[in-house]
Amino acid sequence: MIPFVWFTEGNAGIYLLSLMTITAIVCFLLGLITENYSQVDKLWSLLPPIYCSIVLLCASFQPRILLMTILAWMWSIRLTYNFVRKDGYKWSSEDYRWPILRKIINNRFLFEIFNLIFISIIQNILLLFIASPIFYIAYHQSISLNLWDLICTLLFLFFFIIETTADQQQWNFHIDKNTHQPWTKDGFLQTGLFKYSRHPNFFSEICIWWIFYAFTFSVQPFSYINWTILGAISLTLLIYSSTSFTEAISSGKYPKYKQYQQTTSKLIPCWCSKKVD
């Protein structure tokens, strides 16, 4: 059972749980009515910084809380921009994997159960939990800003830059692919950061939220593990599993993708990776 009792520690918890619940219900109903199951996708980049802002407004002021909220909104602006330029906010826009998954499940009732449990409920819980470190810090005694906060901030910015670069390289590739540039003939990107990792943007995304969790090390008494680690763990598992599904689709679509898998690391960048010939 998800221990929502943790969110009763401060006034912000009621608002966080209420917003998460309403969002899950709306996403499920919209998916059920329209058969477009990307409703959570449209909110993915917006909810975590909104949750952080609620904590900032409701809790006693702490510089660390303000810093984390700013970082969360930086992440949001980047991801939202990337989603907008891919036409993700069009009403008819849907993640290409959902139609494929519907064919695999091939039963409307079962897919709506999946829509309710995983797409609408579990993913919304995940979005609340990846933002929960800021809640944990707000309602527990913590020390003043220090060197550890600087280290976390610099690491956050480092992986933010890596993710931004990877997304831009991927965007440039698809632009060139649409204009039939020769270097895109294999159908998938394998240069730049993608020479060292098949998904450098996803790797950076995982790192960003583990770093966000690491801010909780400022709470006293000091501990490396607290309940907000559930967000980072869950996101890691989600990205790893969804990436496997994505790659299964790519392997069937592009003849050389399996060779690319054999020569290039899946997530963690490896400098010994080799470009597919």
Image (tube, rainbow, N blue to C red):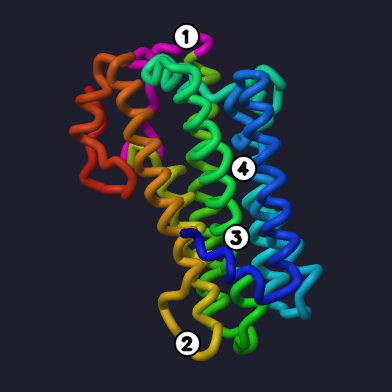
The correct choice, above or below, for 165 with respect to 60 in the image is above
Disc number placed over residue 131 in the picture, else none: 3
Looking at the image, tell me whether mark 1 or mark 2 is earlier in sequence order.
1
Looking at the image, tell me whether mark 1 or mark 3 is earlier in sequence order.
3
Residue 238: x %, y % from top left? 42, 45
Question: Badge 4 is on which residue?
Answer: 44
Residue 249 position by quadrant = top left
Amino acid at pointer 3: Ala
Q: Nearer the viewer, residue 141 or 193?
A: 141
Residue 217: x %, y % from top left? 50, 79
Looking at the image, tell me whether mark 1 or mark 4 is earlier in sequence order.
4
Q: Are marks 2 and 3 in contact (CB under 8 Å)?
A: no
Distance between the alpha carbons at the discs numbered 1 and 3: 41 Å
Distance between the alpha carbons at the discs numbered 2 and 4: 31 Å
Q: Is residue 190 on the magenta stretch? A: yes
Amino acid at pointer 1: His
- The residue segment tinted magenta is 178-196
Mark 2, Cα crowd under 10 Å, few <14 / some 14-19 / many 20+, is: few
Residue 243 position by quadrant = top left
Disc number placed over residue 222 in the picture, else none: 2
Q: Secondary structure at mark 4?
A: loop
Question: Badge 1 is on which residue?
Answer: 180
